[in-house]
């Protein structure tokens, strides 16, 4: 059966369960037919198989989490560093399980001001949210809203660890970065059991504000990740995002960025490592609402075994966005005849005074490079791993040093030390 045939009954059951947990009656929630469940007949979903998500049993779902193995460099923290993990009761706590001490410049928002979609609908004027965001909005909690102010940088580390099957987590994070403020945000999301993790992040960047975000998401073959980010940039703001994804049975990452009046900077760098039968899907949209905006976007993917990587990068430059400077590059490494890469950088340009480029490459390991390493006494398998790591390093070297200390990332990059002659 097709995904479209199987999904509506599963979705109807899921919505009923979520409505009961939220305390609302089912009619107050959108019913399954209203959701326009995506099918593979849609261009945006034709490579995305949702069976990894729909194999979860809605009647058995829970929200239990585990304590992540925090690296010491993040656990210790400082006066302007905050580390938070999501506990099984839906609360954000520090690594010791206590409410965090908020530093100067970082203030929690009242719960009544944390409404899912308030930034998303300014970034996507059509009002049609993607599937992950819709499921997040139908899920009761957990939410975290923070206001960042002041010129001194604030460091925030968020971690989610899933170790039990049938886990359903849909955290919502709202960040209001005031004009001139600076936030350094890191994410670590891990799932080692059949589960669904659906984070939704909304960011309002004021004039001259800066957000530097580094996200790692790794899972197991039975886990599904549907992540959505909505970033609204004011003039002179800077947004930098580095995203590393691997291991999931299904991962669909969808960042939406809008420069409301142009005159802002957006830097996106992503790495997807698809091995086994992993499907890693990235759909990004960057739109310019004014002149003189800048974009630097580079996405890299490595596919091995039966892994499948999908990239669709959409850049929208309307007539009022003159003098836009945007570049987009998709680089891919294909390591198996059974693996698959689908990539589509996409420019939609109406303005006539712009500097916009895009490109895509798909290549394999080169025999001459392997031969060179083998001639230096390195075995073929290890030579292959060294070349793979070199390919990944172009993105990984941009990660903050604290992020590189996570054990999960170290396992991804583990390479045996060659025997000494």
Image (cartoon, helix red, strand yellow):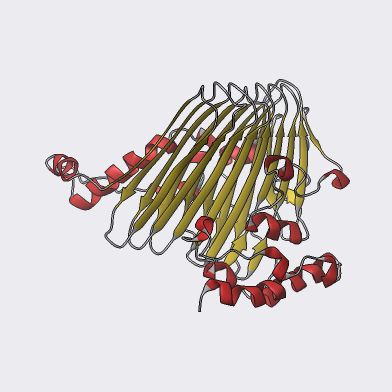
Picture residue at 15% right of the left edge, 41% below the top:
368
Q: Residue at x 51, y 45 (%)?
A: 406
* Quarter of the figure that contains the C terminus: top left
Residue 328 visible here: yes
Residue 80 falls in which quadrant of the image? top right
| Residue pictured at 28% horizontal, 43% vertical | 386
Res. 340 image quadrant: bottom left
Q: Does 372 appear above or below 291?
A: below
Closer to the camera, 382 or 340? 340
Kindly indicate the quadrant of the structure image that contains residue 420. top left
Residue 413, horizontal then vertical, whole percent: 39, 46
Left or right, 119 with reference to 304: right
Residue 119: x %, y % from top left? 74, 41
Looking at the image, which is closer to me, 5 or 68?
A: 5
Seen from the viewer's position, the closer of residues 22 and 345 is 345
Q: How many marks?
A: 0
Q: Position of residue 3 (x, y in %)?
A: 54, 72
């Amino acid at each position: 059966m097709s995904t479209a045939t199987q999904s509506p009954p599963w979705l109807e059951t899921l919505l009923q369960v979520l409505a009961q947990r939220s305390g609302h009656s089912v009619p107050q929630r959108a019913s399954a037919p209203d959701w326009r469940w995506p099918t593979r007949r849609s261009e945006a979903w034709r490579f995305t198989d949702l069976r990894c998500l729909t194999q979860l049993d809605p009647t058995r779902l829970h929200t239990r989490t585990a304590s992540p193995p925090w690296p010491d460099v993040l656990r210790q923290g400082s006066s302007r560093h905050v580390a938070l993990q999501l506990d099984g009761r839906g609360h954000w706590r520090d690594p010791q399980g206590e409410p965090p001490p908020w530093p100067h410049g970082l203030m929690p928002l009242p719960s009544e001001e944390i409404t899912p979609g308030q930034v998303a609908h300014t970034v996507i004027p059509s009002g049609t949210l993607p599937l992950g965001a819709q499921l997040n909005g139908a899920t009761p909690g957990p939410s975290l809203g923070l206001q960042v102010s002041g010129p001194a940088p604030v460091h925030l580390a968020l971690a989610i660890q899933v170790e039990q099957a049938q886990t359903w987590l849909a955290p919502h994070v709202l960040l209001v970065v005031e004009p001139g403020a600076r936030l350094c945000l890191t994410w670590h999301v891990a799932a080692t059991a059949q589960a669904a993790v659906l984070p939704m992040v909304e960011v309002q960047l004021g004039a001259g504000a800066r957000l530097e975000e580094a996200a790692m998401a790794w899972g197991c073959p039975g886990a599904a990740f549907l992540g959505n980010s909505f970033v609204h940039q004011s003039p002179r703001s800077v947004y930098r995002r580095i995203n590393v994804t691997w291991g999931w049975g299904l991962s669909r990452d969808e960042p939406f960025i809008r420069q409301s009046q142009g005159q802002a900077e957006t830097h996106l760098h992503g790495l997807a490592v698809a091995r086994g039968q992993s499907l890693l899907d990235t759909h990004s949209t960057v739109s310019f609402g004014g002149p003189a905006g800048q974009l630097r976007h580079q996405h890299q993917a490595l596919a091995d075994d039966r892994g499948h990587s999908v990239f669709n990068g959409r850049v929208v430059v309307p007539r009022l966005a003159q003098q836009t400077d945007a570049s987009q590059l998709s680089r891919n490494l294909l390591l198996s005849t059974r693996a698959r890469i689908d990539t589509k950088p996409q420019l939609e340009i109406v303005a006539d005074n712009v500097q916009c480029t895009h490109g895509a490459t798909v290549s394999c390991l080169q025999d001459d490079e392997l031969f060179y390493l083998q001639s230096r006494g390195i075995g073929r398998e290890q030579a292959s791993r060294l070349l793979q790591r070199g390919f990944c390093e172009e993105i990984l070297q941009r990660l903050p040093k604290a992020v590189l200390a996570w054990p999960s990332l170290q396992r991804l990059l583990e390479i045996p030390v060659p025997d000494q002659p």
